[in-house]
Image (cartoon, rainbow, N blue to C red):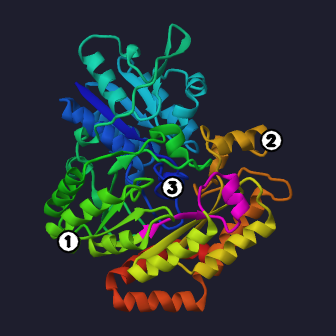
Amino acid sequence: MKVFFVNPSFKAEYGKFSRENRSPTVTRSGTLYYPLWLIYAAAVCEKDGFEVEFLDAPAKPMTGQEQYDYIGSHGFGTKLFVVNTSTPSIVNDTDVADHLKEHYPDAFVMLVGTHPSALPDETLANSKLLDAVARHEYDYIVRDAARAIRDGKDPFAVNGLTYRKDGEIKSNPDMPYITELDEIPFLAEFVKKHLNYKDYFFAAGEYPEVQLFTGRGCMARCNFCVYPQTMHGHVYRMRSAENVVAELQYIADNFPDVREIVFEDDTFTIKKDRIFEICRLMQEKGLNKKFRWLCNARVNLDLETMKVMKAAGCHLIIPGIESGSQQILNNIKKGTKLEQVHQYVKNAKKAGLQIHACYMVGNKGETKETMEETLSLALELNTDTAQFYPLLPFPGTEAYLWAKENGYIHGGYMDYVKEDGTINCLLELPGLTGEEMVKFCDDARKKYYMRPSYIWHRIVMGIKDPADMKRSLKAFKNIKKYLLK
């Protein structure tokens, strides 16, 4: 039986729309994430014996018609379609699902992702033909629905589904989170068989790269972060160190030109002894000489761990610093102190690690003055790279409820991005408009990257490390029209 996984085309005329970003968009840097959740679910189905088709339309990028032509030539015999979504593209994604149901009436069609997880009833109500949506972590939801269809049982009985049946919308109990993550197939094996890894780009890392999860869940309670609140929860579940390193060895053996591994866990560094074991095994197998790696790392990471990571091939860590105002950090439940941020940056420089810092404006309590505090902090910390984004309050998050209840959201789901697919801002806060926040982020980006001292720093880094120069030039090629505009 065939299961067809579709990451639909969206804004293809403007570039590669990256649904897996925490703020889905056509990025200014050209970054395109692997559709990680969709890949893992497809790999689980393939491991279970199902024939799998996989289309990542944004990776090419394909137009809507090219997408349908591809499905038409590969979709014969499909009994289950699984369609990926995001909030900015949800209207488009629902239309794609309806189109598939119309042309494959005997197939079961479901939507997956953060948006239908947060708003399952609304998502179904806005569709004409869609059968169901999967809520939260959906690997086993899709697998169990495929098993039911194959075995002539009722797919609507699968836990984790919200579905339409006989004109009514109903919800089954949640599917339990997966605890034995070593049972999930290697993402790299699936990519090797079904995708072209050179279609993907991570601006802060070396090209080409492979992204993967070593764990799921996030113990932090940041009120804006969409994945813990809609997909994988707040309990960090981990693959064993041996399982992680076995996949890295597979990548080294089967992707000889891959230069970077991107660990996409929200809190990769949360368990110190596991990080030490992963690093020890990487060095033991010589993998630290095969490729470099980067990871998300909260600002409570200590110097000792940084040094161990550096020795094992890590070159870059990515913290969510968010704001230069301690009050705003408290308001968003970040759980960090500005003193930690300063120490973190000092320690990273001692350990020889680069930092890609993430900053955000538009949270509870934001003013023009606090935005300037954030920019001042960014310039003072002077990390290797930085990004500035307005808050996008996604359904399912506490930030969304706060903004919705106070009437701060102005616009619909399609307004989460501009016409060209780049990031937009729907918020109108007291004394601060969405346009002002977007302009601040654009100006902050220019002030940060167009400093003579920064440009000289990148030149020196490039002389020391030609791979870094190559990465910087590729990223600058994509972003220069925004910096120079």
Q: Is residue 400 above or below residue 75?
A: below
Residue at 33%, 25% (x, y): give it: 80
- Label located before the other in sequence (1 or 2): 1
Q: Which residue is mark 3?
A: 13
Mark 2 crowdedness (10 Å alpha carbons): few <14, some 14-19, many ≥20 = few
Residue at 75%, 57% (x, y): give it: 434
Q: Which residue is mark 1?
A: 290
Q: Given the image, on which type of amino acid does mark 3 rest?
A: Glu
| Quarter of the figure with the N terminus | top left
Q: What range of the chain is rendered magenta?
A: 317-336
Mark 3 crowdedness (10 Å alpha carbons): few <14, some 14-19, many ≥20 = few
Contact (Cβ within 8 Å) of mark 2 with mark 3: no
- Separation of disc 1 and disc 3 at Cα? 36 Å
Give the left or right position of residue 310, taking residue 235 as reference: left
Q: Which residue is mark 2?
A: 407
Residue at 61%, 44% (x, y): give it: 394
Pick whichever, 6 or 338, lies toward us: 338
In the image, residue 47 lies at what x, y percent? 19, 35
